Amino acid sequence: MSITYKSAEEVQGMRTAGRLASEVLDHLTGHIKPGITTKEIDRLAADFMKKQGTTSATLGYQPAGYPPYPASLCTSVNHVVCHGIPNDKPLKKGDILNVDVTVIKDGYFGDTSRMFMIGDVSIAAKRLVTLTYEAMWHGIVKVRPGIHLGDIGWAIQKFAESHGFSVVREFCGHGIGRNFHEEPQVLHYGKPGTLEELKPGMTFTIEPMINAGRRDVKEWGNDGWTIVTKDHSLSAQWEHTVLVTETGYEVLTLSAGSPPPPAFVPAQ
Ligand code: MF3
Ligand code: CO
Ligand code: CO
């Protein structure tokens, strides 16, 4: 498989799928508070997707070597880095939670995730959540024709490490379109000027996983999916799907409830 460059019509399909994925997160936002379980969040999302006329890309998803993923979204709490499976444990004050939603609409995929802080969280946790959001945007603002994927990775890594955090290496962003995961891989670390050159029509995700402690991760338990930090430190992640335009970027996974970009992002 190689990189697919989307036509105007395909971009329109991606815009719709992206907005719908983000609207699932909007819908969940009011429900995410102490006492709710991640399974209940999954159920709310599944019901909402039905109303939207979308299907979950994660339910039953089975890349080579994995068991089928059993839920309509991923819920990663505290030291869970990614791919957490919804369960019956209630969220409690002080937890931080990533909810990662991928929907399919008319054959197109939209993939986005946000962090949620449950009640009051520690200053350290809040800082990790905020700075990880900024790290994602430091990558997004680089996007335009002529730059290289390494420029995105470098921008994210430099920002995260300058604040004493570390970047997870084992998982990356990805091309997306009529497939959930396509080329290219979008690393969240790297060197300026290296890797693939960006061209108009590329669509891919930027989804840095940033750890408060060391970057090392491991598989948790035996569910075949859940990834945690080796040192048990907190981990955060945000994700958008973006399009390379003729002059810059367009974020495809925006909706009414999306948090505003950080102040350093120039108005488009
Ligand atoms: N949405 C995740 C991503 O950003 C992938 C989740 S795969 C799953 O690429 F099977 F764990 F849901
Ligand atoms: Co995702
Ligand atoms: Co993704």
Image: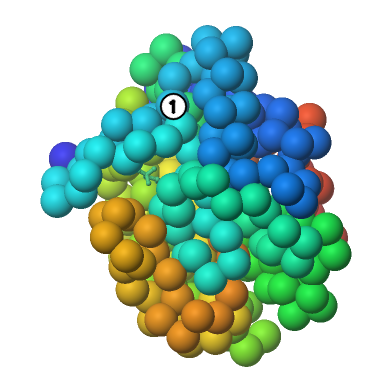
Instruction: Determine which quarter of the picture holds residue 6.
Output: top left
The picture quadrant for ligand 1 comes to top left
Which residue is rendered at x = 59% and y = 13% of the image? 52
Whether residue 143 is visible here, answered yes or no, is no
Q: Is residue 252 above or below residue 13?
A: below
**Residue 25 visible in the snapshot:** yes
Pick whichever, 248 or 155, lies toward us: 155
x and y percentages locating residue 157 in the rendered image: 52, 77
Image vertical order of residue 84 relative to residue 251, above or below: below
Indicate whether 68 appears above or below 56.
below
Please state, as top left, top right, bottom left or bottom right, where the N terminus lies in the image.
top left
Q: Which residue is label 1 attached to?
A: 56
x and y percent of residue 114 in the render? Answer: 64, 49
The three-letter amino acid code for the residue at tag 1 is Ser
Q: Residue at x 49, y 17 (%)?
A: 54
The local secondary structure at tag 1 comes to strand
x and y percentages locating residue 123 in the rendered image: 81, 78
Judge left or right: residue 191 versus residue 207.
left
Total count of labels: 1
Q: Residue at point 83% right, 58% down? A: 119
Residue 174 percent coordinates (x, y): 37, 49
